[in-house]
Image (cartoon, helix red, strand yellow):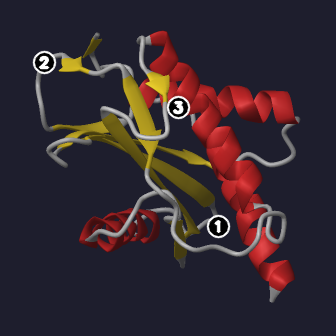
């Protein structure tokens, strides 16, 4: 059972490594610049202890990419910030999907987004096997709890990438998802 979970987490890390530069879909909830200086991630749900399934390495990679992107916009990570960042990873193939929602929080949106990705994956016209992944990022106003931006990128999984290339692909995906997020100090 632990081995199966490890394989799924490894697949998730490969998912994010395969995010391409194709333009992500976005939900623009608030048009215009956002006044913010700090951000924090959603407090994670209860998980297995670190190191038991490889999931923490995937989260560090995604969070590092988001932190670098927001830092380039003048927003720094803090224990509690002006913005809250949530993210969801959905991995799947022609038949099934799984979501990793540790840092997405408790929301009915989790299931809706998972089902939307599932429908897109299984609705493929090709009967050939494929594996793909989707990274969804939400930016939320911490004070009002309103969704400011939602964006996502989907890509085929790429296997056997060296760590530096995988990190570069994750950064590329995050940068494309957050490319239209305008921040004013």
Q: Which is nearer the N-term, disc 3 or disc 1?
A: 3
Tag count = 3
The N terminus is located in which quarter? bottom right
Residue 39: x and y in percent read: 41, 32
Residue matched to label 2: 32
Q: Which is nearer the N-term, disc 2 or disc 3?
A: 2
Q: Is residue 13 above or below residue 20?
A: below
Within 10 Å of the Cα at label 2, are there few (<14), some (14-19), or many (20+) other Cα atoms? Answer: few
Tell me, for residue 66, which label it has, or none: 3
Name the element at disc 3.
Answer: helix
Say whether marks 2 and 3 touch (CB < 8 Å): no
Asked if one can make out residue 21 in the rendered structure from this viewpoint, the answer is no
Distance between the Cα atoms at labels 2 and 3? 20 Å
Residue matched to label 1: 129
Observer-nearest residue: 121 or 139? 139
Distance between the Cα atoms at labels 3 and 1? 31 Å
Q: Which is nearer the N-term, disc 2 or disc 1?
A: 2
Q: Residue at horizontal 29%, vertical 68%?
A: 107
């Amino acid at each position: 059972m632990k081995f199966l979970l490890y394989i799924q987490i490894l697949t998730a890390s490969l998912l994010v490594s395969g995010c391409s530069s194709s333009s992500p879909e976005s939900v623009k909830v608030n048009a215009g610049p956002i006044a913010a200086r700090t951000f924090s991630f959603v407090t994670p749900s209860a998980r297995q202890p670190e190191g038991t399934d490889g999931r923490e390495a995937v989260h560090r990679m995604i969070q590092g990419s988001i932190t670098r992107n927001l830092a380039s916009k003048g927003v720094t990570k803090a224990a509690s910030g002006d913005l809250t960042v949530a993210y969801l990873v959905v991995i799947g193939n022609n038949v099934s999907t799984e979501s990793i929602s540790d840092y997405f929080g408790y929301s009915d949106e989790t299931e809706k987004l998972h089902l939307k990705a599932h429908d897109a994956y299984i609705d493929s016209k090709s009967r050939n096997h494929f594996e793909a992944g989707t990274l969804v990022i939400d930016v939320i106003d911490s004070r009002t709890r309103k969704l400011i931006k939602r964006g996502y990128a989907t890509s085929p999984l790429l296997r056997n990438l060296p760590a530096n290339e995988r990190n570069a692909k994750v950064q590329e995906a995050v940068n494309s998802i957050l490319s239209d997020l305008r921040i004013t100090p």
